[in-house]
Amino acid sequence: DDSNEKKHLAAAVRQLDLLDRLARQSAATASQERTRYHFDYTRLTADLQRMRTGINDYLTPQRAQPRDPTTLQGEYRQDSGQEAPK
């Protein structure tokens, strides 16, 4: 049923919102120690936004044809000697 799908997708967006808030809080409180690897919160936040946008575009389409999907970044562990890709 279409209404159940929309309810489930709306719930998924709320969960993505929660994950985004948790990621931002974790990033703000993350240790600033010099370690070899750290979690790339910026990349995670961008992927969460990309997923949220994709679901919202489906729920409220702006045009008849879906747009090309964008690949998620993934790989959230980053060597501290590297800059985060943008």
Image (cartoon, rainbow, N blue to C red):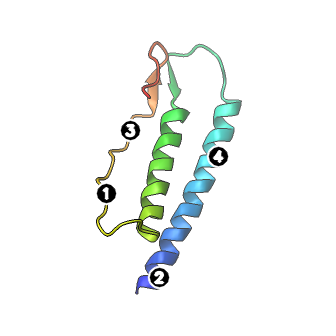
- In the displayed image of the protein, which residue is found farthest to the bottom? 1
Q: Are the residues flagged by discs 2 and 3 in contact, CB closer than 8 Å?
A: no
| Mark toward the viewer: 4 or 1 | 1
Q: Nearer the viewer, residue 50 or 16?
A: 50
Q: Amino acid at mark 3?
A: Gln
As measured in the structure, the alpha-carbon distance from the residue carrying label 2 to the one carrying label 1 is 24 Å
Q: Which mark identifies residue 22?
A: 4
Of helix, strand and loop, which one carries label 1? loop
Residue occupied by mark 3: 73
Between disc 1 and disc 3, whose residue precedes? 1
Of helix, strand and loop, which one carries label 4? helix
Q: Residues within 10 Å of mark 1 (few under 14, many from 20)?
A: few
- Give the residue at x 66% y 19%: 32
Between disc 3 and disc 4, whose residue precedes? 4
Q: Are the residues flagged by discs 4 and 2 in contact, CB closer than 8 Å?
A: no
Q: How many marks?
A: 4
Q: Amino acid at mark 1?
A: Arg
Which quadrant of the view contains residue 59?
bottom left
Q: Amino acid at mark 2?
A: Asn
Q: Are the residues flagged by discs 3 and 4 in contact, CB closer than 8 Å?
A: no
Q: Residues within 10 Å of mark 2 (few under 14, many from 20)?
A: few
Q: Quadrant of the N terminus?
A: bottom left
As measured in the structure, the alpha-carbon distance from the residue carrying label 4 to the one carrying label 1 is 29 Å
Looking at the image, is 51 positioned above or below residue 46?
A: below
Between disc 2 and disc 1, whose residue precedes? 2
Q: Amino acid at mark 4?
A: Leu
Residue occupied by mark 1: 67
**Residue 53 percent coordinates (x, y):** 47, 55
Of helix, strand and loop, which one carries label 3? loop
